[in-house]
Image (cartoon, grey):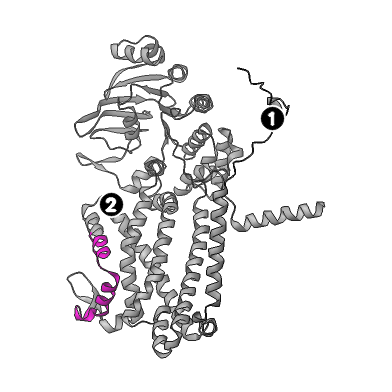
């Protein structure tokens, strides 16, 4: 057999082989694309034209001070719980990785306990804390107290929410952080040891930055859960975004749908912001992990515009 | 003058597995010692014990006459505090088989991390010194690259520069070329050869017998956690006395 079988066009095999390969047609993909486009258009049309959404009332409520107040509380509680939860999580994770059996056991038990208690039960327990302990004291263990707080000094409604959410968050964050630390190669600790870096510097400068690469996607997941989870503080009489919306509904029963849409849009917006922040933080911590870091959407847009302009000026 | 490295009666076991079984080794200042032996013979454990990455069950290590990881307290050996132990580690450079460069730091930042952590120099001085070291291993143009952007040979040369940055009294190499493609071995051995000639004290675990013959002042054959034979390259490599040394050499040569 030779390869010089002449094609019917009279061209030689070599001439044909030099040309480009014609890609396979995929009609199924096209049909699916068209169907999805139609469905999307239909959905958008219904969404915007359906009177029941009452977009005029939505606009009325969207920037009302009462709603913004609720939003502010949501942001405050989320931010504080995120910070305390993460710090607690790092400490617990280090406890679980410690050589001391007691520290390991205590960390494990904490995580086990707080992952077991439903958040709402935890919040209600703290809300009714005074039934358990009347006052808290700072002082020598088993010795005399330096300062004593009664339950009411200590626990404003916001504090209850932040404490409850942080306690819960720390348990989950601990496992996320631990997974991140475990994902760092043993050789990195050894190299840091061999250079004689102090313990804290080994962790902060060498291990944690690498662990964060694995931690960030899971932790942002946690944060988004936390952000939406704050809506639960309505049940301990706190008016966050969801709380305000809920209480307004009893005064304005006809505005139930627009009010819920207001809350939805804010939650979607906040989640979007978190996702964007995640993208950039992740990118920052991927330094050195990838041979070349992919350009951001903005950088891609800029190069595309530049190319377009260059082409236009050439013409 | 005290020896650069002195290991006495080093023993170490993992459970019932005896990894080191009474190893005695002395390396004089400026000497290059090469440790050879079959895999699992305890070569790496010996090196790691020198740098306290492993703790010995019995025996001791002295570098430049100073006990490593322990001090004499009354009639007993007492473990050093973390701070003192870390200071001692700076006297011993360690080059790993798998480089272990910090992937999130640039090559230059990898090199200056040690001196900065030990507050040996300001950032400016450390950089200047770091650049000189990178020039010495032929990587000055890669100072701002990240480790994963480099070839294996370049990474290992950067790791050697990092070990040199602390101006150690002794550098130990744990199979520095075993993770490299064959064509990259030469550039790393070249850097090690320059070091050996510059009078730095080196202890090298390697399977490159030809290289050992060329640079070793002393060759040590280790098997099953014991030193079977040691001497000059001509004695151990070309005229081995022991059956096990002969068997090993016939397999690797």
Q: Secondary structure at mark 1?
A: helix
Identify which residue is drawn at 20% across, 69% down: A141
Up-down relation of residue A144 to residue A210 (above or below)? below
Is residue B65 in sight in this rendering? no
For the N terminus of chain B, the quadrant is: top left
- The image quadrant of residue A87 is bottom left
From the image, tell me which residue sits under label 2. Answer: A98
Q: Secondary structure at mark 2?
A: loop
Relative depth, front residue between B153 and A195: B153
Residue B15: percent from the left, percent from the top? 20, 34
- The image quadrant of residue B46 is top left
Q: Residue furthest bottom?
A: A251
Find out whether residue A118 is within the magenta segment.
yes
Q: Are marks 2 and 1 on the same chain?
A: yes
From the image, tell me which residue sits under label 1. Answer: A16
Is residue A300 in sight in this rendering? yes
Q: Residue furthest front?
A: A8
Relative depth, front residue between A191 and B147: B147
Provide the residue span drawn in magenta. Answer: A109-135
Identify which residue is drawn at 22% across, 70% down: A140
For the C terminus of chain B, the quadrant is: top left
Residue A116: percent from the left, percent from the top? 24, 64
* Chain identity of mark 2: A
Find out whether residue A36 is within the magenta segment.
no
Relative depth, front residue between A174 and B95: A174
Mark earlier in primary sequence (2, 1) = 1
* Chain identity of mark 1: A
Q: Residue furthest right?
A: A315
Residue A142: percent from the left, percent from the top? 17, 70
Up-down relation of residue B134 to residue A171 (above or below)? above
> Circle 2: is it few (<14), some (14-19), or many (20+) Cα within 10 Å?
some
């Amino acid at each position: 057999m030779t390869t010089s079988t002449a094609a019917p066009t009279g061209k030689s095999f070599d001439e044909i082989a030099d040309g480009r390969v014609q890609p396979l047609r995929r009609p199924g993909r096209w049909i699916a694309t068209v169907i999805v486009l139609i469905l999307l258009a239909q959905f958008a049309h219904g969404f915007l034209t359906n009177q029941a959404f009452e977009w005029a009332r939505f606009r009325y409520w969207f920037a009302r001070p009462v709603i913004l107040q609720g939003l502010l509380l949501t942001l405050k509680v989320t931010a504080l719980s995120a910070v305390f939860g993460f710090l607690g999580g790092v400490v617990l994770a280090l406890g679980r990785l410690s050589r001391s059996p007691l520290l390991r056991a205590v960390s494990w038990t904490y995580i086990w306990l707080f992952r077991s208690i439903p958040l709402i039960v935890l919040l209600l327990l703290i809300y009714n804390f005074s039934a358990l302990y009347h006052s808290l004291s700072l002082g020598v263990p088993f010795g005399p107290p330096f300062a004593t707080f009664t339950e009411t000094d200590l626990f404003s409604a916001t504090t209850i929410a932040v404490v409850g959410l942080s306690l819960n968050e720390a348990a989950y964050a601990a496992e996320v952080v631990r997974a991140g630390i475990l994902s760092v190669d043993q050789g990195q600790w050894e190299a840091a040891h061999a250079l004689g870096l102090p313990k804290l510097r080994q962790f902060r400068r060498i291990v944690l930055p690498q662990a964060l690469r694995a931690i960030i996607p899971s932790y942002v997941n946690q944060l988004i859960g936390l952000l939406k989870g704050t809506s639960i503080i309505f049940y301990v009489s706190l008016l966050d975004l969801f709380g305000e919306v809920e209480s307004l509904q009893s005064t304005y029963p006809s505005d139930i749908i627009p009010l819920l849409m207001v809350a939805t849009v804010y939650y979607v917006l906040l989640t979007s912001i978190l996702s964007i922040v995640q993208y950039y933080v992740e990118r920052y911590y991927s330094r050195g992990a990838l041979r070349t870091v992919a350009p951001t959407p903005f950088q891609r847009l800029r190069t595309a515009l530049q190319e377009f302009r260059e082409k236009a000026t050439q013409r | 003058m005290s020896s650069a490295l002195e290991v006495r009666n080093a023993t170490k076991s993992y459970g019932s597995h005896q990894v080191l079984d009474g190893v005695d080794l002395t390396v004089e200042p400026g000497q290059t010692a090469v440790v050879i032996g079959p895999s699992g013979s305890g070569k790496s454990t010996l090196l790691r014990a020198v740098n306290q990455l492993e703790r010995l069950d019995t025996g001791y290590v002295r570098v430049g006459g100073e006990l490593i990881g322990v001090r004499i307290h009354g009639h007993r050996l007492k473990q050093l505090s973390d701070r003192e132990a870390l200071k001692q580690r700076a006297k011993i450079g360690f080059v790993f088989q798998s480089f272990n460069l910090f992937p999130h730091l640039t090559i230059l930042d990898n090199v200056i991390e040690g001196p900065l952590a030990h507050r040996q120099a300001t950032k400016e001085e450390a950089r200047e010194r770091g650049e000189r070291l990178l020039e010495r291993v032929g990587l000055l143009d890669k100072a701002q690259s990240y480790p994963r952007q480099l070839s294996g040979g370049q990474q290992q040369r950067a790791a050697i520069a990092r070990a040199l940055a602390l101006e150690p009294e002794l550098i130990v190499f744990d199979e520095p070329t075993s993770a490299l493609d064959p064509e990259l071995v030469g550039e790393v051995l070249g850097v090690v050869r320059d070091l050996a000639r510059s009078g730095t004290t080196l202890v090298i675990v390697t399977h490159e017998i030809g290289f050992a013959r060329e640079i070793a002042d002393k060759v040590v054959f280790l098997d099953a956690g014991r030193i079977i034979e040691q001497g000059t390259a001509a004695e151990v490599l070309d005229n081995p006395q022991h059956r096990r040394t002969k068997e090993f050499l016939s397999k690797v040569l």
